[in-house]
Image: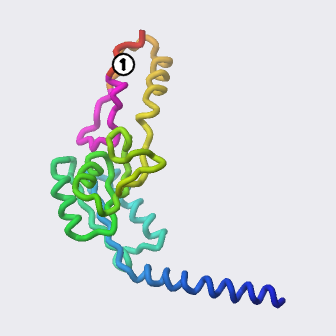
Amino acid sequence: MKRREFIGVIGGTTIAWPLIALAQQSSRKLWRVAYLYPGTIDNPPDRALFDVFRAEMRELGYIEGKNLVIDNRDAGGEAERLPSMVSELIALRPDVIVAIATPAIAAAQHATSAIPIVMAGTDPIGLGFIKSLAHPGGNITGMANMFGDAIGKSVELLHAILPSAKRIAIPPTRGSTSWWTPPQKLWTLRSFE
């Protein structure tokens, strides 16, 4: 081994040791995640979402019963239950709150400004959850589907497919948890003429 390579290995090891020690310390920490869902986790599609979340956490090295506790609450489609549920979760002192859909995000936001909230929802800027996608500010981050941004194009496409249609309706699903909140501009569309 050449001298330069040897020094590189020693230098790399010296730099890596503190990082390895830090990683070992974090793996010993018990992380607590509060998972707040407005629907019913017993419902198979909703359960699949929760199971994917748990699988991804495992993939990242967070193992339930080892270094992770997930406290989940589902409101069973009754959004009025969410504020008391988020209060219960906050009492458990979670490291982070995962809030799925608009009602859960709103309940978590109103309950705490100190615990980080990871959201999955629609139109976080329009609903006042964050200031901008680039700089959310506050304690909320996460992902947003952009259905609201695409509604204009969707209506144009629908009109191209059904040019004789004069009105459209978007029926909510039974027990809707408001994954999608129609933007105001949708309600102002009166006709295609």
Image quadrant containing the C terminus: top left
On the rendered image, what quadrant is the N terminus found in? bottom right
> Which amino acid, mark 1?
Leu
Q: Position of residue 67 (x, y in %)?
A: 38, 78
Q: As drawn, is 12 to the left or to the right of 134?
A: right
Left or right, 164 with respect to 4, comes to: left
What residue range appears in magenta? 170-187
Q: Relative to 153, is 134 above or below? A: below
Tally of marks: 1
Left or right for 106, reference 55? left
Residue 119 spot, x, y in % from top left: 36, 53
Q: Which residue sits at x=34%, y=15%?
A: 190
Residue position marked by numbered label 1 in the rendering = 189
Q: Is residue 39 visible?
A: no
| Image coords of residue 103 (percent x, y) | 26, 47
Which of the 4 quarters of the picture holds residue 69?
A: bottom left
Alpha-carbon neighbours of circle 1 within 10 Å: few (<14), some, or many (≥20)?
few
Query: In front: 152, or 10?
Result: 10
Residue in view at x 80 percent, y 86 percent: 4
Residue 79: in magenta span: no
Residue drawn 32% across the image and 48% down it = 101
Q: Is residue 54 above or below residue 192?
A: below
> Relative to residue 29, is residue 49 depicted above or below?
above
